[in-house]
Image (cartoon, rainbow, N blue to C red):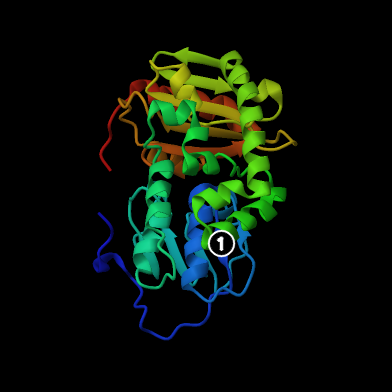
């Protein structure tokens, strides 16, 4: 069930200044947010692709005309759309926030009637992917599921991939999923994903230990976090109710990235991950999130994160 008008903070009938640009995260949800916003608003600048960590720590310059989607709030923005538990606000703002499967769903509901194409299937699939509402076959064989397969080609690892993210936005605005997947650049990315995923499975097995009901994958010995299907660990370690992935955030090895998620196949984790990670310079959803911090804090933060997951306590908001 989609949002009703009571969640819409801004009145679209008012005269507003044209938006300068979309500021969003380079994941599939962010890509679809950009698709919808470019359809609904007079965007005049290129998309600004931003990591949540940079946004959270105020490293990004935000201008009065900007529309932020799928990222933490910034007081300078024109509109804000988000659904992450850890990003909730207690003051008025323009845009929409609610704990729902995807930020794209919020944007879609907010601009109902403003789209020239039918985006219902795209948004429904984005809801499914961003909330990790996946079946075992969808995890093991994403190539058999078009939207899931396409989402696997979007990684926020390399800022140099921005031309590809922009290309996807243009494709999804104008073409059905079958034609998007037939695009030569998308075909190349899909083939690359399958190749990398084979080696990722090997790296995953070699660098993962099961601590009780928590799988802990530590890629720091590899120097760089390998690319692959982030849901695959849950199929390899079915007894785990949660997974922790650790790696260096970049080539300098000065920062550590920790990603935490509820298993999508063994749904017995009670920890609100986004809330828990706010203690460790991170945040996210109730079921998944990430934290990025200086390497000097790793020996303090990582054991505490794992301990919280091992306790598996459901805490009140």
**Quarter of the rendering containing residue 271:** top left
- Quadrant occupied by the N terminus: bottom left
* Label 1 crowd (10 A; few <14 / some 14-19 / many >=20): many
**Residue visible at 53% across and 58% down in the picture:** 175
* Residue 137: quadrant of the picture: top left
Q: Give above or below for 96 relative to 223.
A: below
In the rendered image, is residue 91 in sight? no
Q: Which residue is mark 1?
A: 23
- Residue at 45% x, 69% y is 79
Q: Secondary structure at mark 1?
A: strand
Position in image of residue 80 (x %, y %): 45, 64
The answer to whether residue 14 is visible is yes
Near-viewer residue (208 or 231): 231
Is residue 156 shown left or right of residue 104?
right
Taking the spot 58% from the left edge, 58% from the top edge, the residue there is: 171
Q: Residue 124: x, y in percent? A: 37, 50
- Quarter the C terminus occupies: top left
Horizontal side of 167 relative to 160 (left or right) equals left
Tell which of 36 and 304 is nearer to you. 36
**Residue 194 position in % (x across, y down):** 61, 30
Q: Nearer the viewer, residue 207 or 124?
A: 124
Question: Is 75 rendered above or below residue 288?
Answer: below
Residue 243 versus residue 183 in the image, above or below: above
Q: Tell me the residue at 43%/48% (across/down).
A: 126
From this viewpoint, which residue is outermost toward the right? 252
Q: Which of 218 and 117 lies nearest the eye of the viewer?
A: 117
């Amino acid at each position: 069930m989609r949002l009703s008008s009571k969640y819409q903070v801004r009145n679209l009938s008012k005269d507003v200044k044209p938006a300068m640009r979309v500021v969003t995260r380079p994941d599939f949800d962010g890509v679809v947010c950009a698709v919808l916003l470019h359809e609904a608003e007079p965007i005049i600048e290129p998309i600004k692709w931003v990591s949540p960590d940079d946004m959270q720590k105020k490293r990004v310059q935000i201008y009065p005309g900007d529309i932020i989607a799928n990222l933490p709030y910034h007081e300078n923005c024109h509109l804000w759309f988000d659904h992450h538990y850890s990003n909730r606000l207690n003051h008025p703002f323009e845009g929409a926030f609610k704990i729902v499967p995807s930020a794209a769903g919020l944007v879609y509901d907010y601009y109902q009637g403003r789209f020239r194409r039918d985006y219902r299937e795209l948004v429904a699939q984005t809801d499914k992917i961003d909330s990790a509402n996946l079946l075992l076959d969808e995890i093991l064989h994403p190539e058999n599921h078009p939207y899931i397969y396409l989402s696997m080609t979007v990684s926020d690892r390399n800022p140099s991939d921005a031309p590809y993210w922009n290309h996807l936005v243009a494709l999804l605005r104008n073409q059905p999923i079958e034609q998007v997947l037939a695009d030569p650049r998308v075909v190349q990315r899909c083939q690359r994903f399958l190749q990398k995923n084979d080696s990722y499975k090997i790296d995953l097995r070699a660098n993962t230990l099961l601590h009780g009901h928590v799988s802990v994958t530590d890629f720091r010995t590899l120097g760089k976090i390998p690319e692959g299907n982030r849901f695959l660990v849950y199929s390899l370690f079915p007894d785990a109710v949660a997974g922790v992935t650790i790696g260096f955030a970049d080539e300098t090895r000065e920062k550590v990235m920790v990603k935490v998620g509820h298993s999508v196949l063994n749904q017995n984790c009670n920890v609100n991950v986004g809330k828990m990670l706010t203690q460790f310079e991170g945040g996210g959803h109730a079921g998944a999130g990430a934290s990025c911090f200086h390497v000097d804090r790793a020996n303090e933060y990582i054991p505490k994160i794992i301990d919280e997951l091992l306790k598996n306590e459901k805490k009140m908001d």
